[in-house]
Structure formats: structure tokens, C-alpha cells
Image (cartoon, rainbow, N blue to C red):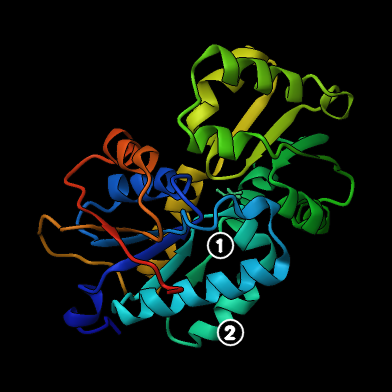
């Protein structure tokens, strides 16, 4: 039964600690140009990857409340750290009827349905790697798979500060990717939504020797599938006006919205914790 047009016209909420989620938001915009997006980047608390589980849960639930108050019809957690430690808390808070999509499940499903990878590497924040969710979910589907996870905590703050595609980012990336843990992998999951921004440098390191997966396109496809199956997709013609909120204004975020997100961006500061 198709949902009422008023429900399907409502915005889609997306959140992350900062600019990383824009990689997912942009892939969603590309596939579903009529959807109106409300994006929240918690730049006041970033990076989430170094924070406690308790704090990540507390902030995430609060952002979910904000997105619900904006009338969002579905919520995308465009952050691995939040997906790894606070997905259930957010889902519980949002309640039934409003889908909550995390970034980990679609990527795990995709990697397991691809070639028969034997040894998968995962890089991500400390919070994501500590939670060990990727290894647990991959091994649940493919018990024979070896999963080597490495925390790469410098990468998200580095990207957030605008350091990518330069000699500093290259040095840090090459150092992490050369670690013994990742020596024998045949595929690598970029387990942080910031990392598509350094994808060219990661590809340059591997020179096609292994398969690299980032979440943006995979998650956007999953979001489209959920909206379609729940009859929540917007089917009309409109040029949506997206809203981008940050808990603390940062020039890096402003610059990045313009680089990574096509279309008009009106940045608004919203401190949910004042
Ligand atoms: N983009 C986030 C992720 O996918 C994390 C960045 C941060 O540590 O704040 O894990």
C-alpha cells in the first residue's frame, strides 16, 4: 500500500560527527535527486572515534530526536563509529515506523556477496575497531574469512581539517597501510565514512592489487531499497532544498559541503546541547 504523498515528501535525516557523512549524503542525492535531506554534523564533539560508548550513544540519541522533530521519514546513520556502538540505542529511541539505516550492514552484505574474499582488512576509528562489529558480522556470514582490523585514528581528524591529497595525508596513509596486520589482505573495507575522501590516495597505495570498498555508494543503494520497500520514496518532481546543520561552525565543513555536495548548501549552526 503506497504511503500518503505527505509522508513520502518528508525529508530524509542523515547524521555523522562531521563531514564524512557528506560522502553518503552525496551518493543518496545522486541516486534520489528528489529527496530532501536534513544533514546534521556534530562538529562540536568530533572526532567520535576517540570518545566513550556512553557519550556516542548520548549524542546520537539527541541528534535522532532533532531529526525526528524536523519531520524526517527515515534516518541514516552515516558514521561507522555510531553504527558500531549506538545503532540499537538510536533505533530504540526512534521507535517503529521510521526506518533507521546504519552503514555497516549494507557493506558487510555487499562484501560477502562479492568474490570469495579470503582475508579482509578493515580500517576505522578506535570506537569502530574496538566494537569489533565488522569482524563479527563478516564471520557470521563467512566463518572461513580472516578479518584483520586496524584502528587508524589520525585519518578522520586529518580529513576533517582539510588534509587530503597532499604530502602529509599520503605519509600518514602509507604508514597505516604498510602495517604488518594488513600485509596479506585481498580486500579492504574503509570502515569510516570520512575515508572516501582519501580513496584516491588509498588506491594509489595499492595500485589495483586488492579490492577496496567504501560505504557511500553501497549505503545509498541500501537506503533506496529500504525507502522503496517501505513505500517511502519521493516520486514527484521537485528541486529539494537541503538543510545542513552543524553543532559548531567549522570552515572545513563549509568548504567541504561545497566541494562534495552538488547543489545549494545553506549551512546552519545548531547546538543541541546548550
Ligand atoms: N565518520 C565517522 C565514522 O564513519 C567517524 C569520524 C569520527 O571519529 O568522528 O566512523
Residue 12 located left or right of residue 113: left
SS at mark 2?
A: helix
Q: Nearer the viewer, residue 65 or 216?
A: 65
Quarter the C terminus occupies: bottom left
SS at mark 1?
A: loop
Task: Name which residue lies at 53% across and 76% down.
Answer: 61
Residue corresponding to mark 1: 102
**Nearest to N terminus: mark 1 or mark 2:** 2
Q: CA distance from mark 1 to mark 2?
A: 13 Å
Residue 45 located left or right of residue 98: right
Do the numbered discs 1 and 2 sit on residues whose CB atoms are within 8 Å? no
Residue corresponding to mark 2: 92
Residue 220 located left or right of residue 119: left
Q: Residue furthest front?
A: 274
Dot 1 alpha-carbon crowd within 10 angstroms: few under 14, some 14 to 19, many 20 or more: many
Q: Look at the numbered disc 1 and say if its residue's Cβ is closer than 8 Å to ligand 1.
A: no
Quarter the N terminus occupies: bottom left
- Residue 43, image x, y percentages: 46, 53
In this rendering, the answer to whether 100 lies above or below 208 is below
Amino acid at each position: 500500500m503506497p504511503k500518503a504523498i505527505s509522508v513520502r515528501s518528508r525529508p530524509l535525516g542523515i547524521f555523522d560527527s562531521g563531514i564524512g557523512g557528506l560522502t553518503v549524503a552525496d551518493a543518496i542525492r545522486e541516486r534520489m535527486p528528489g529527496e530532501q535531506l536534513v544533514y546534521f554534523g556534530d562538529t562540536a564533539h568530533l572526532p567520535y572515534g576517540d570518545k566513550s560508548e556512553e557519550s556516542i550513544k548520548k549524542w546520537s540519541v539527541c541528534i535522532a530526536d532533532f531529526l525526528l522533530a524536523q519531520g524526517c521519514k527515515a534516518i541514516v546513520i552515516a558514521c561507522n563509529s555510531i553504527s558500531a556502538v549506538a545503532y540499537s540505542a538510536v533505533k530504540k529511541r526512534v521507535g517503529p515506523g521510521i526506518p533507521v539505516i546504519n552503514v555497516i550492514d549494507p557493506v558487510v552484505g555487499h562484501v560477502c556477496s562479492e568474490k570469495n574474499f579470503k582475508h579482509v582488512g578493515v580500517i576505522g576509528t578506535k570506537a569502530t575497531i574496538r566494537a569489533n562489529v565488522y569482524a563479527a558480522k563478516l564471520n557470521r556470514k563467512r566463518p572461513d574469512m580472516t578479518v584483520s582490523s586496524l584502528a587508524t585514528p589520525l585519518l578522520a581528524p586529518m580529513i576533517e581539517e582539510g588534509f587530503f591529497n597532499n604530502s602529509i595525508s599520503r605519509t600518514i596513509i602509507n604508514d597505516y597501510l604498510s602495517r604488518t596486520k594488513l600485509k596479506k589482505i585481498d580486500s579492504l573495507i574503509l570502515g569510516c565514512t570520512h575515508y572516501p575522501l582519501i580513496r584516491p590516495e588509498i588506491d594509489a597505495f595499492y595500485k589495483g592489487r586488492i579490492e577496496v570498498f567504501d560505504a557511500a555508494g553501497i549505503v545509498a543503494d541500501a537506503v533506496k531499497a529500504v525507502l522503496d520497500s517501505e513505500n517511502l520514496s519521493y516520486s514527484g518532481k521537485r528541486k529539494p532544498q537541503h538543510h545542513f546543520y552543524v553543532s559548531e561552525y567549522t570552515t572545513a565543513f563549509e568548504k567541504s559541503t561545497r566541494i562534495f555536495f552538488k547543489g545549494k548548501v545553506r549551512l546552519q549552526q545548531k547546538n543541541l546541547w546548550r
